[in-house]
Amino acid sequence: MKTRLIATLAVAGALVLGAQTSAFAADYTGAVNTTAVAPGGIITYSATDTDLPAGVTGTASLTGTLAAEEAVITPASTKTATVVSGENGDINFTIKLPTSAPAGSVYTLDVAVGSFNDVKTLTVAAVPVDSAAAAGSSALPSTGVDATPYVWFGGGLLVLGAALVSVLAFVRRSNKTA
């Protein structure tokens, strides 16, 4: 009975003390230039008044659809990048969302540098980045699908269907004559 009471008190004490330790981390906020961006668009993140000394190293993580495959967080080309606080303790970096991100997909940006923690939610807008216009090209983008494989597949199904009907008709005739 005493061991159960001691074990229960130990677990309760660990839960109470463990919950309080997370309250000591400072929760500052940074800002992004926009929370809705087109696929392949670039977002700038900045945080001032962080109370951080210069040169504190932390991480910036982008999580969401296709984030592991294509997301680029400068200065590194990975899903999680290292960021360093600037001269005044400011945190500044850019994020490039995936070019193939579906419209309406949601990304979470988590920035943790020293005692600074910030989480932002980013949504991919329905308008894609026009790479041809950005490159100065006047060519129209492709907006359709190549239907050739579907036409060949449908034609093949018609030929197979006609062959099946012919074989069944031949079998029926030969059964009637027998």
Image (cartoon, helix red, strand yellow):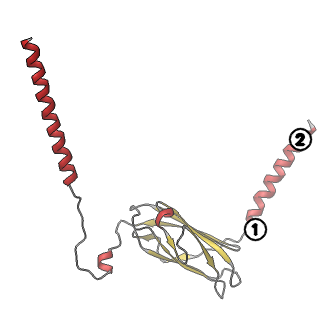
**Quick check: 153 above or below 44?**
above
Which residue is nearer to you in this view: 37 or 175? 175
Q: Is residue 15 left or right of residue 132?
A: right
Mark 2 crowdedness (10 Å alpha carbons): few <14, some 14-19, many ≥20: few
First of labels 1, 2 by sequence position: 2
**Quick check: 28 above or below 69?**
below
> For the N terminus, which image quadrant?
top right
Residue that appears at 45% across and 75% down: 42
Q: Give the residue at mark 2.
A: 5
Q: Secondary structure at mark 1?
A: helix
| Image position, residue 102 (x, y; %) | 39, 61
What amino acid is at disc 2? Leu
Alpha carbon separation for disc pair 1 and 2: 30 Å
Residue that appears at 29% across and 76% down: 132
> For the C terminus, which image quadrant?
top left
Residue 140's tag is none
Q: Give the residue at mark 1.
A: 24
Residue that appears at 18% across and 40% down: 157
Mark 1 crowdedness (10 Å alpha carbons): few <14, some 14-19, many ≥20: few
| Image position, residue 141 (x, y; %) | 25, 70
